Image (tube, rainbow, N blue to C red):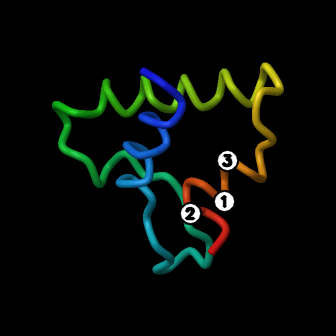
Amino acid sequence: MTLEQAIQLVRKAVKHPGTIDVKHIDLTVVPAEERPTYEKALAVIQLEISKGGVPKDVLYSRLHLDH
């Protein structure tokens, strides 16, 4: 899975503010049978952050967590 594919997938799991005033990734909004794929995508994203390939704030923006 590429970083771009991971970002596109994880965007679907971004939960908009409700009782929490901050957007966040919530895997409970995806079907249980798809969770392993989302977990893999999150691992790809985390690896890019830890390698220093893409700054965290840039990834957050691409995931729509900053709006």
Query: Element type at marker 2?
Result: loop
Residue labelled with disc 2:
64
Please tell me which residue is depicted at 60% across the width and 62% down the height of the picture. 65
Residue labelled with disc 3:
59
Drawn side of residue 46 relative to residue 24, left or right: right
Is label 3 in contact with label 2 (beta carbons under 8 Å)? no
Is label 1 in contact with label 3 (beta carbons under 8 Å)? yes
Q: Earlier in the sequence, mark 3 or mark 2?
A: 3
Three-letter amino acid code of the residue under disc 2? His
Query: Distance between the Cα atoms at labels 1 and 2?
Result: 5 Å
Please tell me which residue is depicted at 50% across the width and 79% down the height of the picture. 19
Three-letter amino acid code of the residue under disc 3? Leu
Is label 1 in contact with label 2 (beta carbons under 8 Å)? yes
Q: Is residue 8 above or below residue 53?
A: below
Query: Distance between the Cα atoms at labels 3 and 2?
Result: 9 Å
Q: From the viewer's side, name the closer residue of 23 and 20.
A: 23
Drawn side of residue 40 relative to residue 48, left or right: left
Q: List x then y, in percent, for residue 9.
A: 37, 43
Tell me the quarter of the picture where residue 32 sits: top left
Query: Distance between the Cα atoms at labels 1 and 3?
Result: 5 Å
Residue labelled with disc 1:
61
Three-letter amino acid code of the residue under disc 1? Ser
Which class describes the residues within 10 Å of circle 3: few (<14), some (14-19), or many (20+)? Answer: some
Q: List x then y, in percent, for residue 62.
A: 60, 54
Please tell me which residue is depicted at 18% across the width and 43% down the height of the picture. 31
Q: Is residue 37 above or below residue 66?
A: above
